[in-house]
Amino acid sequence: NAAAPAPPPPLSPVHEEPELSIAETIAQEERADTNAISSGSPSNTESSNAQLSQSDHVDDAHTTTLAEGRPVPATRVGRAFGFATLGVGLAAGTVVEATSRLFGGSTNKDDSVPEYSAVASDANADRLAAHLCRMRGAALKLGQMLSMQDEAFLAPPLARALARVRGSADAMPMYQLNSVLTEELGSDWREKLETFEDLPFAAASIGEVHRATISPSDADVASGRVALKVQFPGVAESIDSDLNNLTMLVKATGLAPPGLFIDEVIRVGREELKVECDYTREAENQTRFRNLLLADDVLSGSECKLSVPRVIPELSTTRVLTTEFAQGGTIDKVSNLDQEERNRIGRAILRLTMKELFVWRFMQTDPNWGNFLYDVGTGTTHLIDFGAAREFSKEFVDGYLKVVKSSADQDTETLIDASHQMGFLTGEENDIMLEAHKMSGFTVGEPFATDEPYDFGKSGISNRLSGHSSAFLQHRLTPPPPEVYTLHRKLAGAYNLCIKLGAIIPCRDLLDEIVENHFDGDAST
């Protein structure tokens, strides 16, 4: 799915809602990313520049491309038939597993799995993952969202299968690619490019990304190298029907247990998909973010070395987004760099995340490590994929900063008061819930508690935070504000990047700077 900002509030899931606390999200993200790394499989992203493997400067001739896959079901009938086929396959797989268990065996490789429903067999989990990757769109997006839920809610085979779909999708065949590009850029679309690679180098739930070149004079792109993100056909039009069909299938098969709150996961997924399918909006977000970054001398200067690729408007539409090509490898691959450079990167992302929320009130909320590309040759970190960018109101940010500051200061009275005012607590919570809320906040606030450098790698913060989960699940009375779902996902990713980098950095001064200047100006536009 980056470095962390000031300590977020100590929230976690409630029986009525699946929004996760920063504490739980950090722990779950770290587990999922560890699984993905240990699997050895590459993580593709639909970002406009996606993930490039490199040891120094990337040589395009040696970068990986994806093989042409099966067609994307582009009509509602075709997609409905796909879900029906999946349902039949799952039913057959369940019968096979149930029969095997009846005679004292199991088709599962993991002996601990038979305690789960027969529908959650290895074969069915693999069947579901493969089908979601072929369907793409809302189906794959939901699978990716389910993969980020607490593993305690999922049978091990299902958890493993869904972890694979977090960064996976089949590439669409050439005839579908040509159809989309012709509809969006005209029948002469190839003539508008000097070169175009037919095979994408990344693909995910909504689209795939191709390398191309244009004349440097066409769009003020010095190298002429660009990345084209092309949306899969039928994805935007089938969001509602896809999610309705998948909801019915998941509930009928029992793949999603009650504690997963599948209805809320789908509601959030529906909202995110409809926004992310509009590449015109994403282009506007990316341009806005680029301008904000360029106006900040620290973030764009030699200390942080952050950059956002330029959008190429004349080659961008609702379903095609063309940007400068950002050279680099995913930022999680830089753990072999020296400590000083890893510290610089972690602190830069930490500063950026705090600036996004507390100053700009405009945040890219997708923490996927593939959205941070590090160029070893220049030390620049390129920021990409702004489909999930969103604004936060001044009222929300003002209240959230009070929660953050009181967590860092270990100020129980202010923390509880601010949490009540924002709606994180009702005032009717029992002592168990209040203690878990307080200690979760204090733990997340540790990096900002003193002026001393904080060792994220050795902190063990994830394990300590996960200890509060049971109290949240049993005693939480109210869901958090709606802004929290995407915000906590981003903040958790920020902490986990610092953990992955093994960053040892001072953080308190970043928080103090935000607090001191919070009401002095407004840079959100």
Image (spheres, rainbow, N blue to C red):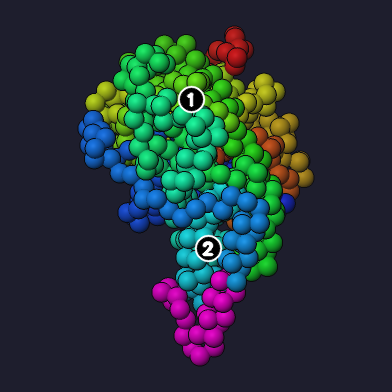
Label 1 crowding class (10 Å Cα cut-off): few <14, some 14-19, many 20+? some
Q: Residue sitting at 59 percent across and 16 percent down?
A: 524
Direction from residue 43 to residue 238 in the image, left or right: right
Amino acid type at image mark 2: Leu
Q: Is residue 304 above or below residue 60?
A: above
Where residue 44 sits, quadrant-wise, is top left
Cβ–Cβ under 8 Å for marks 2 and 1: no
Q: Is residue 460 above or below residue 315?
A: below
Quarter of the image that includes the C terminus = top right
Find the magenta span and give its range. 89-111
Name the disc covering residue 351, or none: none
Amino acid type at image mark 1: Leu
Q: Secondary structure at mark 2?
A: helix
Question: Mark 2 or mark 1, which has the lower sequence index?
Answer: 2
- Any part of residue 458 in sight: no
**Which sits in the foreground, 92 or 197?**
197
Q: Secondary structure at mark 1?
A: helix
**Which sits in the foreground, 252 or 482?**
252
Name the disc covering residue 315, or none: 1
Percent x, y for residue 302? 32, 15
Q: Residue sitting at 24 percent across and 26 percent down?
A: 377
Alpha-carbon distance for marks 2 and 1?
36 Å
Percent x, y for residue 520? 59, 9
Q: Residue sitting at 47 percent across and 81 percent down?
A: 106
Nearer to us: label 2 or label 1: 1
Percent x, y for residue 277? 59, 37
Name the disc covering residue 128, or none: 2
- Any part of residue 516 in sight: yes
